[in-house]
Image: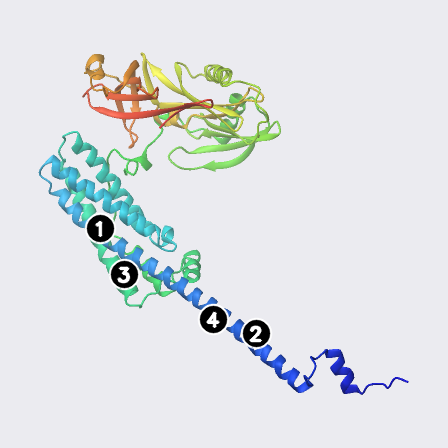
Amino acid sequence: MKHKPKNGAARADRLRLPRGLTRSRGMTLLAVYALAALAVLSGFIYKSHLANENYKRAVTNGYRSAFNSAAASITTLDNTLQKAAVSGTGAMLTETCTEVYGAAMSAKQALGELPNSDRAFEKTSGFVTRAGDYAFSLLKKSARGEKLSEGETANLKSLSETASVLSQNLLELAGEVNDGRLKLGDLDRLAREADAGDGTGALGGRMKSAEEEFPEMPTLIYDGPFSSHIPEMKPKFLEGKSDVSAADAKKAAEKFTGLSGLSDDGERAGNLPVYVFSAPDGDGSASIEVSKKGGVVVNIYSSRVPSAAATSGKTAAATAAKYLAEHGFKDMRESYRMTTDGVCTVNFAATADGVILYPDLVKVVVALDTGKVSGFEAQGFVMHSHAREIPPPGVTADEARAKVSPGLTVLSDGLAVIPTAGKNEVFCREFKCENGDGRHYVVYINAETGSEERIFVLIEDENGTLAV
């Protein structure tokens, strides 16, 4: 007969303790294992905490470095603006304007590395961008051998005064960051302050104060994209035209597009105010913008997604040209076209007496699956088209051709009006050229002064041609 084991022996058997290991010794060993696991876990947690602290420290040091760099760059910007304002020779003006541009780009880069810089330093960043671009425009002027005007000298002095105030503000902020009075590492708090717009935290509040104390920006009228005159530009094509009602604008949109049952989608303000309408268009919708003044169709956009292409780019260009002629756009010349995502965008420029008017640009979009026009953009034409008095060229074709690089072979030439970065215009001789590798370029020589104005590289592939 088998004897039933005692309870303690049964539990020891179930625990499968090694021979000679008692229950008390087993519990001790389990406790040792638990303590060892806890030690490992604690070490892991500490290591993670240490890594996190090191990361925060590295981020903070990076922001501190960017802050100091921004302050130093704007101080340099102030000094070089002062030098440019008193430059007596073209060579010195070129050197100082180059330094101004470099300091502005350095400051812009440093500001971009700071948390929420797009909001916290919006005015400061905008200022350094404009100052750098203005210096770049003067750099091009000095390269042509021209001297500063009294107005340009005054602008440089005004920019310097503004930079001096900004430099002092940033240096004070940088000092407070460096000695620990302001913290750069609390990104969550900075983000909340930026979103709330209240600047309640220490750093957010100091940033906000610096921006609120921003000195008055000088008015800069120059040939560049940040010139003060650009936001004030009015559509030249609409000069003398009367305002129209929304109802009349809708009729103009229906007549132009052939669509009916348009919905009113509100208005868009700006220097070219428009009424906005929409309508179903196949398996998508069309949005039509009509100018409030004159009731001119400015833009048509389609949300329809084309399927497989069934029409060539050449056929699409012919369709686009016919579309423009039917809608009253005369004497338009195809400039270039590009095929992407199932549509062909064809660019046309107006012409007058054989001169191509590139500012008067119209784009027509053709869907390659249906071969029909699906988009229309005439904002460039409406903003710039007007009756021009184009003078006779002061430079002959041969004289202008001599200014083209000897490394290029001229394939064709003509006359053209081209836009500048400041939305102004230059009358030029246009030369389409080729280099020894078969690459194509377009060179523009000023038809009145003979100076080299612009060079474009033509990127040509199976999708079309793009000028860059």
Quadrant location, the N terminus: bottom right
Q: From the viewer's perspective, is 303 left or right of 364?
A: right
Colour scheme shown? rainbow
Q: Earlier in the sequence, mark 4 or mark 2?
A: 2
Q: CA distance from mark 1 to mark 3?
A: 16 Å
**For the residues carrying marks 1 and 2, which lies nearer the camera in this image?**
2
* Badge 1 or badge 2: first in the primary sequence: 2
Image height check: is 258 above or below 121? above
Residue 174: mark: 3
From the top left corner, tell me how far across and down residue 29 is, in percent: 62, 81
Q: Amino acid at mark 2?
A: Ala
Q: Earlier in the sequence, mark 1 or mark 3?
A: 1
Give, as a three-letter code, the residue at label 3: Ala
Q: Which residue is mark 2?
A: 37
**Residue at 47% across / 36% down in the picture?**
267
Q: Secondary structure at mark 1?
A: helix
Residue 241 showing in the rendered view: no
User: If you read the primary sequence from the N terminus, does the residue marked by circle 4 or circle 1 appear first?
Assistant: 4
x then y, percent, for residue 124: 29, 50
